[in-house]
């Protein structure tokens, strides 16, 4: 068996690929555009091309264990079928694992991107040494991965671990794209943070805030990054919006601890980079909303792997566990 | 190795014990009072006595694999220590597994009662043949057990699976004994059902209801059973209270499906015996509050094992898995 794994991270705008060792070290990586708007065939050609180059980079197929691909859901890791990801238009019920196995004569597996990232963090990243890990990525959406005994937990249909769509407030005015009210994604992901700031400033005309100046009064242009900047500059409105975000995430993670009693929680994604104040608010909130008396001691760790997390996670599905 | 397991179910008022085969068949069972109010030593003497009789019933120790005990939490199944269950006053940090192992020279394991019941339902009860099962018992409280790959999921400190204390409404006026607002236990367990009926009738003085007659106007005497009776007789208030209960349980279970994508959900406990109307409301609500597109097909099954579930579950922790 080979000593290298090809990891491929398919995103809406670009595809990253790399060679990863059995210890999770990324040896070589390349990025190409996804060309998602040109339909599946074009994106597939990009992926095939990238894999061909990586095989050459590895010195041939005999050095490889397989090809791991992570992509946005919904997809079925058990069958290797990508169903219909919103940001990969034209991809509908694509038997990606089968197609690549046939093309390259190497085993191929497909995994949900948040699950892959969670596995990578548990095996090589922030949660090395832990067995049961709850992984969260907070950016445009909120994705989660449930790692049990160092493996991804998939559930019956391969779509377990959609923690971003668990509601903490079924009476919330905020309805998520999934149809549920008060999902944590609808309260604390990037767009939700921006919306809460905008709504606050629209409702309180007189309330001064640096966000009015930063957007020249066009409140619809408020972004999470802008809120972070304003908060950093001391703006009370921006600070309270971020505090609220930490509170929501804390209430939600408290429930996850009540259920999973994990060894560690790892938080990645753009929003997690808001930094220490957000993590502090999360940690302060958790023990107030859980029955788990060890909750305050559960490590809540910032993700470690950054931009390579997808490639490493995709490769990690080929690692022997235990 | 022996072919029988001793299962012991320690409750607040009585201790049940039995001999269980490796296929989960209960061969013999006995019940004695717990004498919990007389302190730990008295309860322990009852348990030891019961085990001695069961060993004789089994024809001697050589026919036994071990002793499984389930008890109300909090307890630590990893260390076999019962911490401080509210309805076993005087039990504080009792090393129950160790004590019994020393006393009888047989392996002993301690398990949380909801976990044990969930395992029993998954292995011998309503969910036979399924791998990943979410078990719920709704009575005075709401207990849950997470069964993954036919084994109990414990988490780091052995206290995972406290699903009854996950909030679906952190802004709820109903605060749970655990300190959290809007836990499903605070909304849908027996006492919560009775309270919602009482509050409704207190607030709406003119609202006619059979519950006023059944309690002779003493609304504080409303019980879940009374509500069930009144609903059965067609009382609209009682019916709406039970409908609300099904709705709350449905919203909450929707979140559990979003996370676990289980093969099946099993619901036991006294409240589950309200029957078909409750299950129908739960099943109708679930698909509206989850992103899991297979949720409507997830079986929501009434528990099957009834009063022996504790004894069988306690014994089941000794079964070889797979």
Image (cartoon, coloured by chain):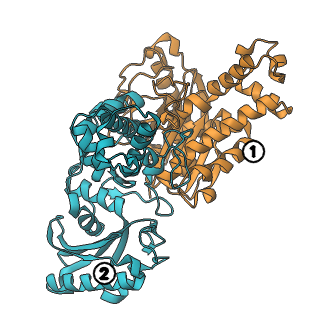
Chain colours: A cyan, B orange
Q: What's the residue at 44%, 59% (across, down)?
A: B322
Q: What's the residue at 72%, 16% (across, down)?
A: B202
User: SS for tag 1?
Assistant: helix
Residue indicated by mark 1: B276
Q: Can residue B28 be seen in this view?
A: no
What percent of the width, then of the height, locates residue A83?
48, 72
Residue indicated by mark 2: A47
Q: What's the residue at 82%, 18% (across, down)?
A: B206
Within-10-Å neighbours for mark 2: few <14, some 14–19, many 20+: many
Q: Please report, as a chain letter, where disc 1 is located.
A: B
Instruction: Indicate left or right for A12 with B51 as reference.
Output: left
The quarter of the displayed image where residue A15 is located:
bottom left
Q: Is residue A179 visible?
A: yes
The quarter of the displayed image where residue B307 is located:
top right
Check the image and report above or below for A234 versus B11.
Answer: below
Check the image and report above or below for A198 versus B218.
Answer: below
């Amino acid at each position: 068996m080979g000593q290298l794994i090809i990891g491929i991270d398919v995103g809406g705008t670009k595809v990253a690929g790399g060679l990863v060792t059995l210890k999770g070290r990324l040896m070589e990586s390349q990025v190409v555009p996804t060309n998602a708007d040109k339909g599946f065939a074009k994106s597939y050609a990009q992926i095939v091309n990238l894999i061909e180059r990586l095989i050459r980079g590895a010195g041939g197929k005999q050095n490889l264990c397989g090809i791991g691909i992570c992509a946005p859901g919904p997809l079925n890791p058990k069958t290797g079928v990508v169903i219909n990801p919103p940001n990969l238009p034209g991809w509908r019920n694509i038997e990606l694992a089968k197609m690549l196995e046939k093309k390259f004569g190497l085993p191929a597996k497909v995994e949900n991107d948040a699950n892959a990232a969670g596995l990578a963090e548990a095996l090589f990243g922030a949660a090395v040494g832990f067995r049961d890990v709850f992984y969260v990525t907070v950016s445009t959406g909120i994705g989660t991965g449930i790692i049990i005994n160092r493996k991804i937990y998939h559930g019956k249909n391969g779509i377990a671990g959609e923690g971003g769509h668990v509601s903490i407030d079924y009476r919330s005015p905020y309805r998520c794209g999934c149809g549920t009210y008060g999902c944590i994604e609808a309260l604390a992901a990037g767009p939700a943070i921006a919306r809460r700031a905008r709504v606050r400033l629209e409702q309180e005309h007189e309330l001064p805030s640096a966000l009015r100046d930063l957007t020249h009064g066009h409140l619809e242009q408020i972004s999470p990054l802008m809120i972070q900047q304003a908060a950093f500059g001391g703006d009370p409105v921006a600070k309270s919006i971020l505090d609220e975000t930490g509170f929501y995430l804390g209430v939600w993670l408290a429930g996850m601890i009540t259920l999973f009693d994990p060894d560690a929680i790892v938080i990645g994604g753009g929003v997690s980079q808001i930094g220490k104040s957000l993590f502090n608010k999360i940690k302060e909130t958790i023990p107030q909303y859980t029955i788990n008396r060890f909750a305050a001691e559960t490590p809540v760790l910032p993700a470690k792997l950054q931009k390579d997390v997808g490639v490493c996670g995709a490769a990690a599905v080929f690692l022997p566990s235990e």
